[in-house]
């Protein structure tokens, strides 16, 4: 698969309507949450992406049966799921660590391969582990595996040093079956966390303050299986909207809550786009050339780090200089070298990037280094002169469902070539 490439002929404004899929970063957590109760779950609007496939395999190793029909995933969870998430799967997707909380809560034991390095930073998990230990888990490192044990977790107050998305989710899922009340302060507020809490609530969990910095969970003795529809993917939607702006196009994305994209839409408006937000859809049109715009990534509701690389491409095309500041990950600017190969003029200084506008992007062979940088390269290629070949599709496919087919419906000249 890794020899496949996207071939993109740039210069065509994107136009039309497109529906966002369900959010990757919600679907993966909802799938892990099924481990909290025996029975059959039906989760609709699950994106058919590689990361979801990896989580299907993780659930499979834990004894769950899954079937897909279109974008509806059925998960059958046994009375006693397994407790080990092995290296070969966690290596492919760090987010597998999210089974730690649910397995500990349900089985009192979890053995999860320690996630390794990653292209956007070292991505520690100390906050997950410290929180679980405060709830009574004993966690040891054993030959590259985290081995966590407890009798029954006990509710407690956890103040996170940083509003980590994964730590907040692991601790919420640990708390729902714990004895007593768990209070998470400085919790992450990403909409995907509210979505997870909504599903947990229909399973019988008692959670107050979902989607706020103070989440309070009153543990219950048992939960039950449920059905759920995944929230729309704000990052996929934002990617298409930035692509519309970068190509001087006019695109409406449906199936996404504009309030989940407040700051990106504000920044697109500052860059000169016409932005029309409806109830569950948003239209972005860019009649003239983009204006420069500074932006700073922060946990939600700040500007999402997952749209930073895409936005930097738009800034490269602007009629002036912009500054991007990355505050969430320590080394998420590594993709800049690839974008430079297409003619972008970007200088880095620590967690700041100075983007000189007015670039005439040119086609070049490039390689996607991670999911979102891959999406940024696609946007750069759509805005560039000539035919760009993008490899490293394994990354783009981890987060975007059939990106070439979806963009082609908006008039993009893009195709996937598979070597024979
Ligand atoms: N951090 C720690 N200790 C921890 C946990 C996090 O120091 O215990 C640090 C990390 O090193 C990082 C920062 O906190 O610098 C943010 O990490 P966070 O835990 O919030 O992120 P995550 O849960 O690992 C999720 C998404 C990412 C997204 C971030 C931030 C999933 C599967 N992944 O990661 O999505 O960028 O939140 O919003 O939900 C992507 O979709 O391409 C992607 C990378």
Image (cartoon, rainbow, N blue to C red):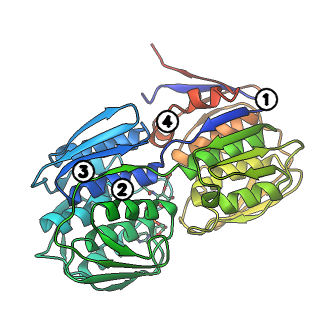
Q: Residue 217: x percent and y percent?
A: 32, 77
Q: Residues within 10 Å of mark 4 (few under 14, many from 20)?
A: some
Which residue, given by chain and number where applicable, does mark 4 sit on? Answer: 401
Q: Is mark 1 within 8 Å of ligand 1?
A: no
Give the quadrant of the N terminus: top left
Label 1, label 3: how far apart the Cα atoms are: 43 Å
| Real-space CA distance between mark 4 and mark 2, rounded to the nearest whole angstrom | 18 Å
In the depicted view, which residue is nearer to us: 246 or 341?
246
Residue 237 x %, y %: 61, 46
Q: Earlier in the sequence, mark 1 or mark 4?
A: 1
Of tags 1 and 4, which is closer to the observer?
4
Residue closer to the observer: 41 or 27: 41
Q: Which mark is residue 87?
A: 3
Counting from the top left corner in percent of width and height, residue 13 is at: 78, 32
Q: Is residue 385 left or right of residue 36?
A: right
Q: Residue at x 86, y 47 (%)?
A: 358
Identify the mark nearer the N-term, 1 or 3. Answer: 1
């Amino acid at each position: 698969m890794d020899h496949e490439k996207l071939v993109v002929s740039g210069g065509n404004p994107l136009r039309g309507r497109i529906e966002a899929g369900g959010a990757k970063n919600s679907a993966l957590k909802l799938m892990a949450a099924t481990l909290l109760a025996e029975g059959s779950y039906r989760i609709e609007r699950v994106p058919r992406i590689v990361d979801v496939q990896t989580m299907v395999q993780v659930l499979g190793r834990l004894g769950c049966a899954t079937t897909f029909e279109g974008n509806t995933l059925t998960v059958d969870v046994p009375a006693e799921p397994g407790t080990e998430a092995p290296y070969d799967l966690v290596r492919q997707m760090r987010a597998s660590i999210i089974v730690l909380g649910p397995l500990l809560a349900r089985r009192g034991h979890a053995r999860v391969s320690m996630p390794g390095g990653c292209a956007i930073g070292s991505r520690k998990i100390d906050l997950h582990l410290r929180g679980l230990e405060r709830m009574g888990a004993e966690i040891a490192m054993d030959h590259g595996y985290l081995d966590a044990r407890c009798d029954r977790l006990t509710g407690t107050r956890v103040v996170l040093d940083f509003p980590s998305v994964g730590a907040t989710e692991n601790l919420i899922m640990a708390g729902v079956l714990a004895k007593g009340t768990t209070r998470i302060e400085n919790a992450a507020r990403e909409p995907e966390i509210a979505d997870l809490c909504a599903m947990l609530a229909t399973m019988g969990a008692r959670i107050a303050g979902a989607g706020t910095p103070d989440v309070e969970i009153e543990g219950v003795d048992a939960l039950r299986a449920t059905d759920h529809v995944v929230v729309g993917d704000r990052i996929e939607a934002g990617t298409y909207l930035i692509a519309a702006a970068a190509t001087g196009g006019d695109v409406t994305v449906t199936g996404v809550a504009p309030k989940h994209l407040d700051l990106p839409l504000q920044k697109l408006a500052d860059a000169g786009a016409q932005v029309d937000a409806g109830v569950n859809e948003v239209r972005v049109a860019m009649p003239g050339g983009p204006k420069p715009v500074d932006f700073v990534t922060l946990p939600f509701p700040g500007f999402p780090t997952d749209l930073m690389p895409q936005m930097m491409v738009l800034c490269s095309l602007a009629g002036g200089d912009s500054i991007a500041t990355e505050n969430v990950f320590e080394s998420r600017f590594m993709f800049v070298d690839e974008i430079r190969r297409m003619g972008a003029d970007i200088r880095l200084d620590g967690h700041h990037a100075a983007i000189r506008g007015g670039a005439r992007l040119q086609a070049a062979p490039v390689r996607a280094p991670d999911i979102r940088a891959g999406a940024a390269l696609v946007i750069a290629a759509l805005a560039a002169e000539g035919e760009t070949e993008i490899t490293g599709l394994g990354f783009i496919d981890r987060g975007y469902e059939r990106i070439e087919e979806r963009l082609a419906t908006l008039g993009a000249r893009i195709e996937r070539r598979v070597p024979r």
